Image (cartoon, rainbow, N blue to C red):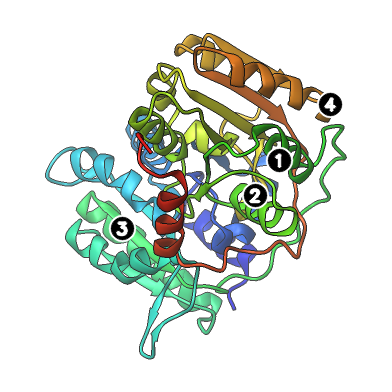
Amino acid sequence: MVDSEGFLGALARFGVQSYFGVPDSLLSSLIVGLEARAEQGNCLLEIAADEGAAVGLAIGQYLGTRAPSVVFMQNSGLGNAVNPLTSLASPKVYGIPMLLLVGWRGEMTALGQIKDEPQHVFQGEITCEVLDILDIPYRVIGPDDALGAAHDAAEDLLRTAMAETKPTALVIRKNTFSTPTKPPQEMSDFPLREEAIKCALTSLGDMPLVGTTGKISREVYELQQGEGLGGPSFLSVGGMGHAAMIATGIALGDPARKVACLDGDGAILMHTGSLATSARQANLIHIVFNNQVHDSVGGQVTAGPDAKLTEVAKGLGYKTAQRITRLADIGPALEAAKAADHASFVEIMVAPGARSDLGRPKATPAESKTAFMAAIGRPHD
């Protein structure tokens, strides 16, 4: 297992001072260390809205300082980063050096693939192939590597990045870095998210709904299985930031039927521009549970913890957008949304954190898809 502090210290000695990215559970100990270093003024750390934006920050930082940055992400975020990596950072375009730290979910070994969540299976299979296609030199490190080996791999990649003016990548296997020790979170006055979801499901009744990836969908699943709450649900296990568009697509298919989306603040920030489309769908109820952190991957603060999401929603076309801080106000807000003749945006402020014994859907994604489609039927049924 590689010591996180020692690894960050090695990068600092090489001259790396800037870190941009989207949190990943495999990299959480590094991010905790970076947060502490940033608070002490020893590095620059910016949590980006999405991985492509993080690459953009690294490009700008290099242009301004001539120093390479580190961009961290889960391998699922490579898709968001492909465009700026190929159309900007590539040596065939501008040639921008940077080091990517890529958490390898669904990693492949000599014995096959390590068991992981369904959304990581295919991405895990092709992670290294994607880097090959992008002509990004990479090395893989894991829990059996010593600090010196991890340091040497990162230093070699940084030297290559500078010499060839191109991105390079360090692919990081599960349990590579030591377990993080996070400082205790401040107590929140907002309700627990699972309680807020329970209120929302009670109000929505049998309305079809789409749940965003992460713990929101897991809590929806628990409440549906344990208490029979809510209507037919499509619980999106991957594709962070796209739940609203999935719900909007369903709503477009049957304008006479209301559809709800249960979303998260981190997901909204990742693809905010999509709100301009969902705002035009009159039969959509868009509910965002905002705890100001990336709860599903370690609780790191989002790119916009103080963003006024209701104002953003109004600016992008929602006629109704309201912010709720009490459980008692959820029901009335959703009743009004159900009666409205336009898209409604409801932001519910909730406390960070979730139960440690939170379950996961037992059915496969394909089985869940089939069951959802059967439950909602065709538009004219």
Seen from the viewer's position, the closer of residues 330 and 96 is: 330
Above or below 329: residue 183: below
Q: Position of residue 286 (x, y in %)?
A: 55, 27
Type of amino acid under label 3:
Thr
Q: CA distance from mark 2 to mark 1?
A: 7 Å
The residue labelled by disc 3 is 168
Of pointers 3 and 2, the one earlier in the residue sequence: 3
Q: Residue at x 20, y 54 (%)?
A: 164
Q: Does residue 229 appear left or right of residue 249 in this picture?
A: right
- The numbered disc on residue 328 is 4
Nearer the observer, 41 or 285 = 285
In front of the other: label 3 or label 2? 2
The vertical placement of 137 against 340, above or below, is below
Q: Earlier in the sequence, mark 2 or mark 1?
A: 1
Q: Amino acid at mark 1?
A: Ile
Query: Would residue 19 appear left or right of 357 to someone viewing this image?
Result: left
Could you say which disc has been placed on residue 220 in the image?
Answer: 2
Q: Residue furthest left?
A: 92
Q: Secondary structure at mark 1?
A: helix
Labels 4 and 1: the sequence-earlier one: 1
Badge 2 marks a residue whose secondary structure is: helix
Q: Residue 159 location in percent, x, y? A: 32, 60
Please rate how many residues cluster around mark 4, counting C-alpha atoms within 10 Å: few if below 14, some from 14 to 19, many from 20: few
The residue at the far front in this view is 381
